[in-house]
Amino acid sequence: MEFSELIKTATVESVLLSCAGLPPVRGTLCITSHHLLLSSCPGGDGQPGTVELWLLIRNVDAVEKRVQNLGWYQPPRTNDSPRDTRLAGSSGTITLRCKDLKVLQLEIPGMEECLNIASSIEALSSVDSVMMMYPFFYRPQDLRLEEGWHLFPLEQYFQQIAAQTSQWRLSDLNRDFTTCPTYPADVIVPAAVSDDTLRRAARFRQGGRFPVLSYYHPRNGTVLLRSSQPLTGPNRKRCPEDEVLLGMVLDEGERGFIIDTRSAQAAKQARMTGGGTEPKSSYPQWKRLHRPLERGRPLQESFIKLVEACNDASLSMDRWLSRLESCRWLSHVKAALSTACLAAQCLDREEASVLVHGAEGTDTTLLVTALAQVILDPGCRTVVGFQGLLEREWIEAGHPFHLRCARSAYSHARLKQEAPLFLLFLDCVWQLSRQFPFSLEFGESLLLTLFDNAYASDYGTFLCNNEKERCLCKVKENTHSLWAWLNQPEEKKKYLNPLYSHNPLVIWPSVEPQSIQLWQGLFFRWIRPSQYLDEARAEMQRLVEGNEAPAKESAGSRLSQSLSDPAARTENER
């Protein structure tokens, strides 16, 4: 397929661009294989126009068109020329609703041009082949292709665990992705369990996702595991190898908890279709807790309803509060935080290991295990540590980004497998950053950037559904890593929290309804101007840096004086 075949009209003059909060701009609209560009008209003297819009077409979620036909006219005929009827004064308006929730309006002169532009954008934004997406064509001058892809090897994470205990090992049994197609090549498993036992246990878990280590809690040696549901079925089948695997996690007399992210009723229904839960008789040291979390269609519809309510400027206060409650998004945030807190509490306070799973183990399971680590581990609350967590618990762990983030909140297409699980995670992290403003090294801007890139990106980090697909598409060889861009010093500085102070403690968030707030920075980002908030953040940064400089100078003077003054040196030694 050639991109040129999908572009019916490549350039249109005198297009008016409108976007909430910004003055309208008129200019030349161009469509390329991956971008929509609008260059404003030159200011005279042959000066080139300014590019006012540079929109990745993959970011377009819905295209709405409205055409105005103002009449027809017939030019005079000469020399028996054929009858010619033309459209007079026709124009059209295209509304582009983007995956990052931005809404743009284009007023295009000419009905045919309007329809052609709309058709071209719809076709280009619907290209589903991973290798035809923009990351495979993007080549920034200041980044190398291999940069950033190997910043967070699982081997490095395992070494941190191995320095504290010898009960776990790094296994490469999945190096060819045959044991589990959605796991990475390497996984961390109990040292006493052989690869053959793991392969047999994998056949007893949906999609082959056998229990693997997600997090080791250094304070007491408990562990957080994740997997998919066991395939017990209606006949309550057993798997000795799976029982041995989970038995090896606990010492004699210890207990563990299995947090099932489905309701007890849903788990029971799953057993009728071949799935199920771990029976108490086969796993006597493990206690099962059901904490249902929505996924799939209900979560996507909740997202859609919330965005619709946020965009409706005509709502009264009562109607707004009613719509906010009925969409249930904040209830999903509360449920996710509550379940993550439960997992963290079992590990830290009950001193008990935890296994988390739902059905497939690629959605709500990862939401809980990743959130629990942000709560427990101060290392995951730094910029680099958070990136490593996302790489380990979302990307390599097999969250199907290509399926879940195919459409955002505006799409008119019939829902398939879209669901904003990753957005829900980011929202929960924002709730933590609001309740603990000094404890996270990064600010809201990093979370917003991650949301944008999960749905449409110049980088290959969130492409595909799992590591096997990324290997087949050669993503790491042919695209740039988002982490390489974010970790450039000048870029990284934009995402830092100026109030950050290292907090070695567990952060226990309040999950009371009064404590859960709407993430206005995301859901109102394009609706209200952010100028004053941006200015306030810049002033905060300036004040913090201004206070740090004298403190550093003062400390440096004292050190210099101490080194040069024997009396001062003696005082310090005292």
Image (tube, rainbow, N blue to C red):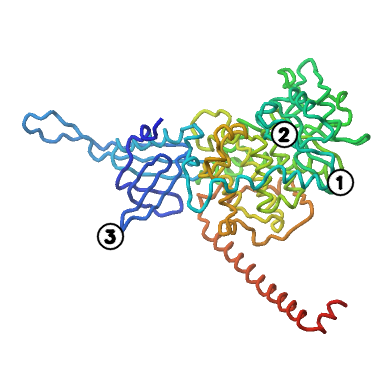
380 or 236, nearer to the observer: 380
* Rendered-image quadrant of the C terminus: bottom right
Q: Left or right? Give the position of 387 relative to 66.
A: right
Residue identifier under label 1: 220
Residue identifier under label 3: 44
* Nearest to N terminus: mark 1 or mark 3: 3
Residue identifier under label 2: 172
Please name which of the two marks, 2 or 1, marks the residue nearer to the observer: 2
Task: Report helix, strand or loop for mark 2.
Answer: loop
| Separation of marks 2 and 1 at Cα, in angstroms | 27 Å
Q: Residue at 76% of width from left, 46% of height from top? A: 159
Labelled pair 2, 3 in contact (Cβ < 8 Å): no
Q: What amino acid is at disc 2?
A: Asp
Task: Report helix, strand or loop for mark 1.
Answer: loop
Q: In this view, does 121 lie above or below 567?
A: above
Q: In which quarter of the image is residue 157?
A: top right
